[in-house]
Image: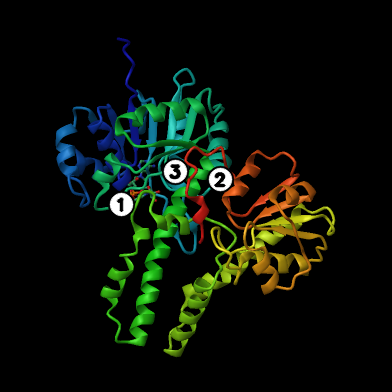
Amino acid sequence: MTDIKQPVIAVIGLGFVGLAAALGFTEKGYKVYAFDIDERKRTSLQQGKIPFYEPDMEEALSTHLNLDFDICESMEEAIFEADLIFICVGTPYEEEKGLDMSSLISVIHDISRLMNCNDFKGIVVKSTIPPGTMRSTLKPLLESHGLEVGRDVGLAYNPEFLREGSAWEDFLKPDRIIIGEVDSRTARLIEQVYSPFESPCVRVSPETAEYLKYASNALLATLISFANEQAMIAESIGDIDIPQMFNLLHMDKRWSGSPAGMSNYVYPGCGFGGYCLPKDTLALTHTAIQYGHKAKLLEAVMELNQDIADFTAEQIIGLLKHRDEQIGILGLSFKPGSDDVRNSPAARIIQLLLDEGCTNLTAYDPIAMSTFRNHYDFPIRMMNSLNEITVGSDICVIVTAWPEFQSLAYNTSVIQIVDARYMLDINKTYFKENYTRKNG
Ligand SMILES: NC(=O)c1ccc[n+]([C@@H]2O[C@H](COP(=O)([O-])OP(=O)(O)OC[C@H]3O[C@@H](n4cnc5c(N)ncnc54)[C@H](O)[C@@H]3O)[C@@H](O)[C@H]2O)c1
C-alpha cells in the first residue's frame, strides 16, 4: 500500500469559523496548527475554554488540544509545517467605512513575508469577501511579494456556510464544499483534505464561490424580511392568525423533496407572468396600503419584474448591429407546459424591442402562438417550428423554458442566442433536470 502523506493544516483566526474548522479538521484526522492574534483568546483556548457558546466544541477542544491541535504563539510557528493555510479572520462591514478587509490583507502580507519558495503552501481564504477579491486583490498582493501563484504559492477560496449555534455539526456535515479555484494544485489539495467529509465537492471560479456566499446569505435575509413584511401587513389587517397562516404556508409540497420544488423559484429567468402571481402580488400591495401599510418588498418585487425584462431587452439590443436584424422570440407563454400568455414576459420584451425600433421580430411557441395572436396586437411574424425560426434569425432569445429549446445547446446554425432562462448550460454537471418548471 502506498503511503500518501496527510496534508498538514494551519488555521489563522480562531473565531466561530476558524475554531470550528481547526477542530473539525483534527476530528477528521489531520494535524492542525492554529493561531489567533488575540492573546486572551489563545490563553483561554489553551485552558480548554471556548470564548463563545457553541455546542460540542469544548469537548472537541479537550479531546484534541496539544495532541493533534496546537495553538501557536506566532503566525510563523503556525504555518511552518503547513501544506494548506486556512484564513478565517473577520471581515466586518461598517455603514460608513464599508467592508473592512484589513485583517485578511495583513495576514496575506505576513504569510508572504514568511514564505519560502521551495516549500509550496496553499492559502485558502474562508473569510467572506466580495466577488472579484481573490483575483483582483489577493493574487496581485502575493505577486507583489515576488510569489507566483500556482508555482511558489497556492490560492483558493473556500466559503463557509456554517450557522452559529450549530457550527460544529455544520462544519463536519457540510451540504456542499465549494472550491473557488485560482490554481489547480491547491484545489486538488483541498479536495484531498475534504475527502473524509463525504460531501459533494465542487470546483468553480473564485468569483462564483465568492458570489455564492453572498447570494446564500442574501436569500436567507430576503426570506426573513418577506415573512416579516407579511406579518406586518397581516397585523395591520387584523383577525389573521399569523403563526397558523405561516405553518399552513409551509405545508406547500414545494418546500420538500430533493431538490425541493421551491428551488425552481430561486432560479433566474426573465420574469414571472401568468394570471395569478402579478395580479395577487399587486392586489396585496394595494390591500396593505388600504390598511395603512406600505409593502416595500412587494413593491420592489413588481418593480424588479419589469427591470428583468428591461435587462433582457438591453442584452438583445446590445448584440444588434442594425435594428432590422431578425430577432427570434422563443416562447410566448408565461411558462412551459401552458398556453397562458397573460402578463407573459415575452409580451414585455417584445414591447420593449418594438419601442427601441426593432423592425424584424419573429416568434415561435409550441402551443401558445394563436392565444398570443388573439391577446396581443404586435407586428411580429409567427414561425412554424424551432428549426424555421432559428434558421432565419440573427439572434434568438429563449423567453420560455420549453424543453425542446434545449436542443439549441447543440445547434450551430444560430448566430447568437440570448438564453434568458439560463437553460442551455450543458457544461454544468449539476444541471437540473426539472428546469422546465422554472419561474412557473
Ligand atoms: N460567524 C459565522 O457564522 C460565519 C459563517 C460563515 C462565514 N463567516 C465569515 O468567516 C469570517 C470569520 O467569521 P467569524 O464569525 O469566525 O469571525 P470572528 O470575529 O468570530 O473571528 C475572527 C478571528 O480572527 C482573529 N484575527 C483577526 N485578525 C487576525 C490576524 N491578523 N491574525 C490572526 N488572527 C486574527 C480575531 O482575533 C478573531 O478571533 C468572516 O469573514 C465571516 O463573515 C462567518
Which residue occupies the foreground of this view, 85 or 27?
Answer: 27
Mark 1 vs mark 2: which is more N-terminal? 2
Q: Residue at x 48, y 43 (%)?
A: 209
Q: Residue at x 48, y 77 (%)?
A: 280
Mark 3 vs mark 1: which is more N-terminal? 3
Residue 182 appears at what percent x and percent y? 52, 33
Q: Is residue 47 shown to the viewer in this render? A: no
Say if disc 1 is inside 8 Å of ligand 1: yes
Residue at the disc numbered 3: 104
Say if disc 3 is inside 8 Å of ligand 1: yes
> What's the residue type where badge 1 is placed?
Arg
Say which quadrant the N terminus sits in. Answer: top left
Of badges 1 and 2, nearer the viewer stands: 1
The answer to whether residue 245 is left or right of residue 411 is left
* Proximity of marks 3 and 1: CB atoms separated by less than 8 Å: no
Q: Is residue 424 shown to the viewer in this render? A: yes
**Distance of label 1 from label 2 (alpha carbons):** 24 Å
Q: Give above or below for 213 relative to 225.
A: above
Of badges 3 and 1, nearer the viewer stands: 1
Helix, strand or loop status at disc 1:
loop
Label 2 environment density (alpha carbons within 10 Å; few <14, some 14–19, many ≥20): some
Helix, strand or loop status at disc 2:
loop
* Proximity of marks 1 and 2: CB atoms separated by less than 8 Å: no
Residue 303 appears at what percent x and percent y? 57, 72
**Res 163 label:** 1
